[in-house]
Image: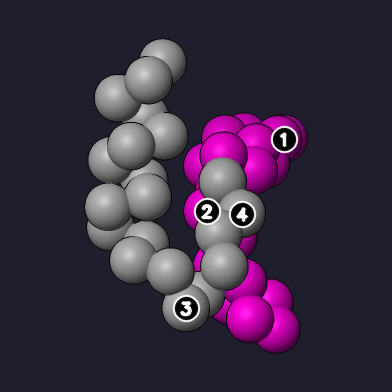
Amino acid sequence: MVVDNYLVCYIVDPGKVTVTDILFGASNVHIRLQERHSES
């Protein structure tokens, strides 16, 4: 979902929405998500 200049990533489960990431839209979103989730 796009909110202003940000991309909000989320997971929808029955009865619950979990925000997983909020990224600045001008960044390289694909690389940022790979970096964030490879650290976990």
Q: Nearer the viewer, residue 34 or 1?
A: 34
- Confirm or deny contact between disc 2 and disc 3 (CB under 8 A): no
The mark lying in front, picked from 4 and 1, is: 4
Q: Which residue is mark 3?
A: 26
User: What amino acid does circle 1 point to?
Assistant: Gly
Q: Which mark is residue 1?
A: none
First of labels 4, 2 by sequence position: 2
What residue do we see at 37% from left, 50% from top?
Answer: 32
Q: CA distance from mark 4 to mark 2?
A: 6 Å
Q: Is residue 14 magenta?
A: yes
Q: CA distance from mark 4 to mark 1?
A: 21 Å
Up-down relation of residue 5 to residue 32 (above or below): below
Q: CA distance from mark 3 to mark 1?
A: 32 Å
Label 4 neighbourhood size at 10 Å, few (<14), some (14-19), many (20+)?
some
Q: Which residue is mark 2?
A: 9
User: What amino acid does circle 2 point to?
Assistant: Cys
Q: Which residue is mark 1?
A: 15
Query: Taking the image as drawn, is residue 12 in sight?
Result: no
Q: Position of residue 14 (x, y in %)?
A: 62, 34
User: What amino acid does circle 4 point to?
Assistant: Ile
In the displayed image of the protein, which residue is found farthest to the top? 40
